Image (cartoon, rainbow, N blue to C red):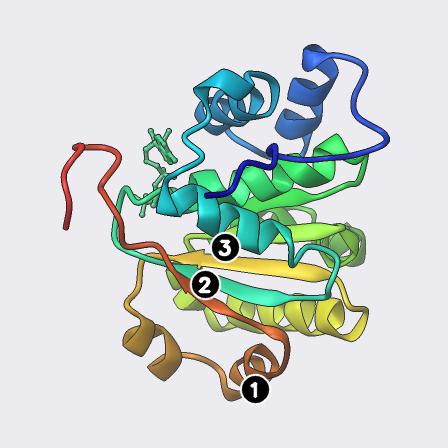
Amino acid sequence: MTTSPASQSNNPPENDAVFFTRLRRAGVGLRSSEFVLHQFTTPEIRDTESKWWDQFQAEKARLGSGMLDVLLGPRGRGKTTLACMLIGCCCWRGQRPIYTTAADMARQIRLGFDEKADQQSRFESADLLVIDEYNRVAETEWADITTQEIIDKRYSHLRDTLLVTNMTTDAFLRGFNTSIRSRISQCGKILLLDGEDFRTGGGK
Ligand SMILES: Nc1ncnc2c1ncn2[C@@H]1O[C@H](COP(=O)(O)OP(=O)(O)OP(=O)(O)O)[C@@H](O)[C@H]1O
Ligand SMILES: [Mg+2]
Protein backbone atom coordinates (compact mmCIF):
# COMPACT_ATOMS: atom_id res chain seq x y z
CA MET A 1 0.00 0.00 0.00
CA THR A 2 1.23 3.46 -0.85
CA THR A 3 0.73 6.05 1.82
CA SER A 4 2.75 8.99 0.59
CA PRO A 5 0.77 12.17 0.00
CA ALA A 6 -0.28 13.37 -3.43
CA SER A 7 2.77 15.59 -3.63
CA GLN A 8 5.65 16.57 -1.42
CA SER A 9 7.40 19.84 -1.88
CA ASN A 10 9.44 22.41 -0.05
CA ASN A 11 7.67 25.10 -1.92
CA PRO A 12 3.90 24.53 -1.76
CA PRO A 13 1.35 27.21 -2.78
CA GLU A 14 0.38 29.65 -0.01
CA ASN A 15 -3.22 28.43 0.07
CA ASP A 16 -5.86 26.39 -1.74
CA ALA A 17 -6.99 29.31 -3.91
CA VAL A 18 -3.47 29.80 -5.28
CA PHE A 19 -3.17 26.10 -6.04
CA PHE A 20 -6.60 26.04 -7.69
CA THR A 21 -5.71 29.07 -9.83
CA ARG A 22 -2.47 27.39 -10.93
CA LEU A 23 -4.42 24.29 -12.00
CA ARG A 24 -6.94 26.32 -14.00
CA ARG A 25 -4.14 28.36 -15.63
CA ALA A 26 -2.45 25.12 -16.63
CA GLY A 27 -5.62 24.28 -18.58
CA VAL A 28 -7.17 21.76 -16.16
CA GLY A 29 -10.99 21.68 -16.38
CA LEU A 30 -13.19 22.61 -13.46
CA ARG A 31 -14.24 19.03 -12.62
CA SER A 32 -10.66 17.73 -12.54
CA SER A 33 -9.37 20.82 -10.73
CA GLU A 34 -11.85 20.22 -7.92
CA PHE A 35 -10.90 16.54 -7.73
CA VAL A 36 -7.16 17.33 -7.68
CA LEU A 37 -7.56 20.06 -5.08
CA HIS A 38 -9.36 17.65 -2.77
CA GLN A 39 -6.77 14.92 -3.24
CA PHE A 40 -3.95 17.32 -2.41
CA THR A 41 -5.54 19.13 0.50
CA THR A 42 -7.82 16.57 2.18
CA PRO A 43 -5.68 13.54 3.12
CA GLU A 44 -8.57 11.66 4.75
CA ILE A 45 -10.48 11.27 1.45
CA ARG A 46 -7.59 9.57 -0.36
CA ASP A 47 -8.19 6.03 -1.53
CA THR A 48 -4.56 5.02 -1.09
CA GLU A 49 -5.21 1.30 -1.53
CA SER A 50 -6.54 1.52 -5.07
CA LYS A 51 -4.59 0.40 -8.13
CA TRP A 52 -5.33 3.80 -9.66
CA TRP A 53 -3.54 5.53 -6.78
CA ASP A 54 -0.52 3.24 -7.13
CA GLN A 55 -0.39 3.98 -10.86
CA PHE A 56 -0.52 7.70 -10.10
CA GLN A 57 2.34 7.35 -7.60
CA ALA A 58 4.42 5.36 -10.10
CA GLU A 59 3.89 8.00 -12.77
CA LYS A 60 4.61 10.81 -10.33
CA ALA A 61 7.99 9.21 -9.60
CA ARG A 62 8.83 9.57 -13.30
CA LEU A 63 8.28 13.33 -13.40
CA GLY A 64 11.46 15.18 -14.21
CA SER A 65 13.03 12.23 -16.04
CA GLY A 66 12.31 13.52 -19.56
CA MET A 67 9.66 10.86 -19.98
CA LEU A 68 7.49 10.38 -23.04
CA ASP A 69 4.74 8.22 -21.56
CA VAL A 70 1.38 7.05 -22.78
CA LEU A 71 -1.75 6.55 -20.69
CA LEU A 72 -4.22 4.17 -22.33
CA GLY A 73 -7.52 2.65 -21.31
CA PRO A 74 -11.24 2.41 -21.93
CA ARG A 75 -13.63 5.25 -21.11
CA GLY A 76 -14.13 6.40 -17.55
CA ARG A 77 -11.06 4.74 -16.02
CA GLY A 78 -9.63 7.99 -14.68
CA LYS A 79 -7.00 8.71 -17.34
CA THR A 80 -7.71 12.43 -17.60
CA THR A 81 -7.95 12.67 -13.82
CA LEU A 82 -4.62 10.90 -13.28
CA ALA A 83 -2.97 13.15 -15.87
CA CYS A 84 -4.40 16.19 -14.07
CA MET A 85 -3.01 14.88 -10.76
CA LEU A 86 0.44 14.98 -12.38
CA ILE A 87 -0.25 18.52 -13.54
CA GLY A 88 -1.18 19.15 -9.88
CA CYS A 89 2.25 17.87 -8.75
CA CYS A 90 3.95 20.40 -11.02
CA CYS A 91 1.62 23.23 -9.93
CA TRP A 92 2.32 22.38 -6.30
CA ARG A 93 6.03 22.71 -6.99
CA GLY A 94 5.53 26.09 -8.66
CA GLN A 95 6.38 24.74 -12.12
CA ARG A 96 4.55 25.57 -15.35
CA PRO A 97 2.78 22.55 -16.79
CA ILE A 98 0.14 22.51 -19.56
CA TYR A 99 -2.88 20.24 -19.92
CA THR A 100 -4.47 20.30 -23.38
CA THR A 101 -6.27 18.07 -25.82
CA ALA A 102 -4.72 17.32 -29.21
CA ALA A 103 -7.54 19.19 -30.95
CA ASP A 104 -7.26 22.24 -28.67
CA MET A 105 -3.51 22.44 -29.06
CA ALA A 106 -3.83 22.41 -32.85
CA ARG A 107 -6.63 24.99 -32.66
CA GLN A 108 -4.64 27.34 -30.45
CA ILE A 109 -1.60 27.17 -32.70
CA ARG A 110 -3.74 27.69 -35.80
CA LEU A 111 -5.67 30.63 -34.28
CA GLY A 112 -2.46 32.41 -33.37
CA PHE A 113 -1.05 31.63 -36.79
CA ASP A 114 0.90 34.91 -37.12
CA GLU A 115 2.58 34.19 -33.84
CA LYS A 116 2.69 30.44 -34.53
CA ALA A 117 6.21 30.19 -33.17
CA ASP A 118 5.14 31.74 -29.85
CA GLN A 119 2.15 29.46 -29.41
CA GLN A 120 4.20 26.46 -30.39
CA SER A 121 7.07 27.33 -28.07
CA ARG A 122 4.64 27.59 -25.15
CA PHE A 123 3.78 23.91 -25.66
CA GLU A 124 7.41 23.03 -26.30
CA SER A 125 8.71 24.65 -23.13
CA ALA A 126 6.12 23.63 -20.48
CA ASP A 127 7.60 21.64 -17.58
CA LEU A 128 5.04 18.91 -18.25
CA LEU A 129 2.82 18.71 -21.34
CA VAL A 130 -0.23 16.46 -21.19
CA ILE A 131 -1.91 15.89 -24.56
CA ASP A 132 -5.30 14.29 -23.93
CA GLU A 133 -7.61 12.75 -26.58
CA TYR A 134 -4.47 11.94 -28.50
CA ASN A 135 -6.39 9.70 -30.92
CA ARG A 136 -7.74 12.85 -32.56
CA VAL A 137 -4.27 14.13 -33.40
CA ALA A 138 -4.07 12.94 -36.97
CA GLU A 139 -7.26 14.66 -38.13
CA THR A 140 -5.25 16.85 -40.46
CA GLU A 141 -1.74 16.41 -41.76
CA TRP A 142 -0.83 19.89 -40.54
CA ALA A 143 -1.94 19.14 -36.96
CA ASP A 144 -0.11 15.84 -37.07
CA ILE A 145 3.18 17.36 -38.23
CA THR A 146 2.97 20.25 -35.74
CA THR A 147 2.31 17.85 -32.86
CA GLN A 148 5.22 15.63 -33.89
CA GLU A 149 7.46 18.71 -33.97
CA ILE A 150 6.40 19.69 -30.45
CA ILE A 151 6.96 16.19 -29.09
CA ASP A 152 10.34 15.93 -30.75
CA LYS A 153 11.51 19.30 -29.38
CA ARG A 154 10.42 18.27 -25.88
CA TYR A 155 12.21 14.94 -26.24
CA SER A 156 15.41 16.75 -27.25
CA HIS A 157 15.25 18.99 -24.19
CA LEU A 158 14.36 16.19 -21.73
CA ARG A 159 10.95 17.67 -20.93
CA ASP A 160 8.21 15.38 -19.65
CA THR A 161 5.35 14.60 -22.01
CA LEU A 162 2.28 12.46 -21.38
CA LEU A 163 -0.03 11.32 -24.18
CA VAL A 164 -3.52 10.17 -23.16
CA THR A 165 -5.90 8.15 -25.32
CA ASN A 166 -8.63 5.54 -25.14
CA MET A 167 -7.26 3.59 -28.10
CA THR A 168 -6.20 0.02 -27.41
CA THR A 169 -2.47 -0.60 -27.01
CA ASP A 170 -2.35 -2.42 -30.38
CA ALA A 171 -4.25 0.25 -32.28
CA PHE A 172 -2.11 2.93 -30.69
CA LEU A 173 1.18 1.27 -31.62
CA ARG A 174 -0.01 0.38 -35.12
CA GLY A 175 -1.25 3.88 -35.89
CA PHE A 176 1.79 5.56 -34.53
CA ASN A 177 4.39 7.55 -36.34
CA THR A 178 7.61 5.51 -36.23
CA SER A 179 9.81 8.39 -35.06
CA ILE A 180 7.66 8.92 -31.95
CA ARG A 181 7.37 5.17 -31.40
CA SER A 182 11.12 4.90 -31.36
CA ARG A 183 11.38 7.71 -28.80
CA ILE A 184 8.74 6.07 -26.59
CA SER A 185 10.69 2.82 -26.63
CA GLN A 186 13.75 4.71 -25.41
CA CYS A 187 12.34 6.89 -22.62
CA GLY A 188 8.67 6.08 -22.36
CA LYS A 189 6.32 3.79 -20.57
CA ILE A 190 2.89 2.66 -21.74
CA LEU A 191 0.52 2.58 -18.80
CA LEU A 192 -2.83 0.81 -19.08
CA LEU A 193 -5.68 2.01 -16.86
CA ASP A 194 -8.27 -0.74 -17.07
CA GLY A 195 -9.77 -0.87 -13.60
CA GLU A 196 -13.29 0.10 -12.66
CA ASP A 197 -15.35 2.50 -14.73
CA PHE A 198 -15.59 5.42 -12.34
CA ARG A 199 -18.55 6.86 -14.25
CA THR A 200 -20.81 3.85 -13.87
CA GLY A 201 -19.15 2.28 -10.84
CA GLY A 202 -18.79 -1.01 -12.79
CA GLY A 203 -15.96 -2.93 -14.42
CA LYS A 204 -15.28 -3.36 -18.16
N1 LIG B 1 -9.41 7.67 -8.69
C1 LIG B 1 -10.67 8.09 -8.82
N2 LIG B 1 -11.53 7.95 -7.79
C2 LIG B 1 -12.81 8.36 -7.90
N3 LIG B 1 -13.34 8.96 -9.00
C3 LIG B 1 -12.52 9.12 -10.06
C4 LIG B 1 -11.15 8.70 -10.03
N4 LIG B 1 -10.59 8.98 -11.22
C5 LIG B 1 -11.54 9.56 -11.95
N5 LIG B 1 -12.69 9.65 -11.26
C6 LIG B 1 -13.96 10.23 -11.74
O1 LIG B 1 -14.43 9.40 -12.80
C7 LIG B 1 -14.93 10.16 -13.88
C8 LIG B 1 -14.18 9.78 -15.16
O2 LIG B 1 -12.80 10.10 -15.02
P1 LIG B 1 -11.93 10.58 -16.28
O3 LIG B 1 -12.66 11.63 -17.03
O4 LIG B 1 -10.60 10.90 -15.74
O5 LIG B 1 -11.89 9.24 -17.15
P2 LIG B 1 -11.19 8.98 -18.56
O6 LIG B 1 -10.52 7.64 -18.45
O7 LIG B 1 -10.37 10.13 -18.94
O8 LIG B 1 -12.44 8.83 -19.54
P3 LIG B 1 -12.52 9.12 -21.14
O9 LIG B 1 -11.80 7.99 -21.83
O10 LIG B 1 -14.00 9.09 -21.44
O11 LIG B 1 -11.91 10.45 -21.41
C9 LIG B 1 -14.76 11.62 -13.48
O12 LIG B 1 -15.98 12.10 -12.97
C10 LIG B 1 -13.71 11.60 -12.38
O13 LIG B 1 -13.90 12.63 -11.44
MG1 LIG C 1 -10.47 11.53 -20.50
Closer to the camera in the image, 101 or 187: 187
Amino acid carrying label 3: it is: Ala
Where is residue 32 drawn, in percent x and y? Answer: 47, 29
Where is residue 5 drawn, in percent x and y? Answer: 61, 32
Where on the picture, by quarter, is residue 13? top right
Q: Evaluate if marks 1 and 2 touch, with contact meaning CB atoms under 8 Å apart.
A: no
Q: Evaluate if marks 2 and 3 touch, with contact meaning CB atoms under 8 Å apart.
A: yes
Q: Nearer the viewer, mark 3 or mark 1?
A: 1
| Secondary element at tag 2 | helix
Of the residues under marks 2 and 3, which one precedes in the sequence?
3
Q: Which residue is mark 1?
A: 182
Dot 3: few (<14), some (14–19), or many (≥20) neighbours within 10 Å? many
Dot 1: few (<14), some (14–19), or many (≥20) neighbours within 10 Å? few
**Identity of the residue drawn at 75% across and 50% down:** 126
Amino acid carrying label 2: it is: Val
Q: Which residue is mark 3?
A: 102
Ligand 2 within 8 Å of disc 2? The answer is: no
Position of 191 relative to 195 (above/below):
below
Q: Which residue is mark 2?
A: 137
Question: Which residue extends farthest right?
Answer: 11
Q: Is residue 68 left or right of residue 128?
A: left
